[in-house]
Amino acid sequence: MLIFSQLITAGLAFGRNLIGIVVKPYESYRRIVNEGTLWELFFLGLLIESYFVLVTRARIGDFLRLTGGVVSSYLLIVFLLFLTVKLFKAQINQKGLLLGCGYTLIPTTTWFYLTSLLYLVLPPPRTSSLAGITFSLLYLIICLTLLFWKTILVYLTIRFSTKLDLGKISLSLLVISPAVAGYSYWLYKLGIFRVPFI
Amino acid sequence: MPDQIYQKFVARWQQVTDLPAQSLGPLTPFYKEISKRLKIMPWPFLVIGSLLIAIGLYLFFGTGIVFLVTLLQRGF
């Protein structure tokens, strides 16, 4: 009963935060890192798993491998960030870091949903016609907007959970990038993800 | 009533001072201007930035962006 009520509370918080990270990312992330509960990751997981259920119907893909790929990437990034921030001798709000990193998967999931939908509605390849170039520009604008949104959320995650400044945050991300890139390439070679789900 | 207002003020003050202020030397005013726009409803700023970069990519790569988009569309 207690778990059920905690899930309900976390579900409401998740919904509120989902809207918040779109409209007021700074304030929402402060609330997520300081007041969030790890139960919210359950709802995040449901959202991501719902995508995998759909995509394994649309294209060839193994649901368990996709889930394993996301979970391992997520844990790797959290672990690497934790280690890197420790080098700066900063205090880490571990729960905040876990939650913040989890919510940074929302832009990723949005991109994957959008790309999958467009694959069905307007399958590639694109041509060099006016329509092809127009669509390409629109698609790139959407991709870049989602990428910038994700960058903001990643920055806010580290800023609120570790209180580091921009310079040290940039350095942390630079340090962990080769490892994350290498792991993403390995997942690509295993045929799990082409674009990394990070 | 004044007590409530004071408690709210203290809570807000603690919230604001919880994070050390960001300092980037001569770039600090520039950073503050950008972060002000990104804290609440950043989408117009993000979309304009993306538009400029996408146009820049088109000017640089020409119709090569079509190949990039084809790759991305197959990325999932």
Image (spheres, coloured by chain):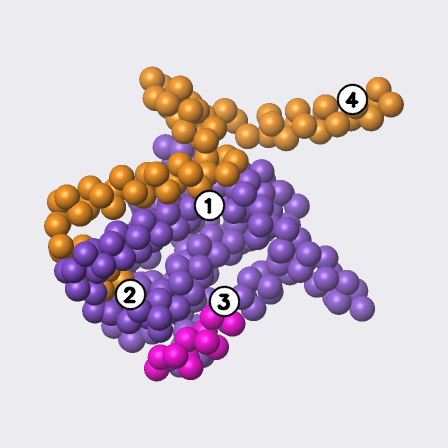
* Distance CA(mark 3)–CA(mark 1): 17 Å
Q: Is residue A84 magenta?
A: no
Have a look at marks 1 and 2 and say if they share a chain.
no
Q: Quadrant of the N terminus of chain A?
A: bottom right
Which of the two discs, 4 and 2, sits closer to the camera?
2
Neighbourhood count class around disc 2 (C-alpha, 10 Å): few under 14, some 14–19, many 20 upward: many
Residue A146: x %, y % from top left: 39, 51
Q: Which residue is mark 3?
A: A48
**Image quarter of residue A171:** top left
* Disc 1 target residue: A153
Colour of chain B in the rendered structure image: orange
Q: Is residue A124 left or right of residue B26?
A: left
What is the chain identity of the residue bearing mark 2?
A: B
Position in image of residue A68 (x %, y %): 43, 73
Asked if marks 3 and 2 fall on the same chain, the answer is: no
Residue topped by disc 2 = B73
Q: Do circles 4 and 3 both sit on a common chain?
A: no
Residue A136 visible to an observer of this rendering? no
Judging from the image, mark 1 belongs to the subunit labelled: A
Instruction: Decide which of B67, A42 is in the foreground and name it.
Output: B67
Q: Provide the secondary structure element on which disc 4 rests.
A: helix
The answer to whether marks 4 and 3 mark residues whose Cβ atoms lie closer than 8 Å is no
- SS state under label 2: helix
Q: Which residues are magenta?
A: A50-60
In terms of secondary structure, what is the magenta stretch mainly?
helix
What residue would you read off at disc 4? B6
Q: Is residue A57 magenta?
A: yes
Foreground mark, 1 or 2? 2
Chain of the residue under label 3: A
- Above or below residue A47? Residue B43 is above
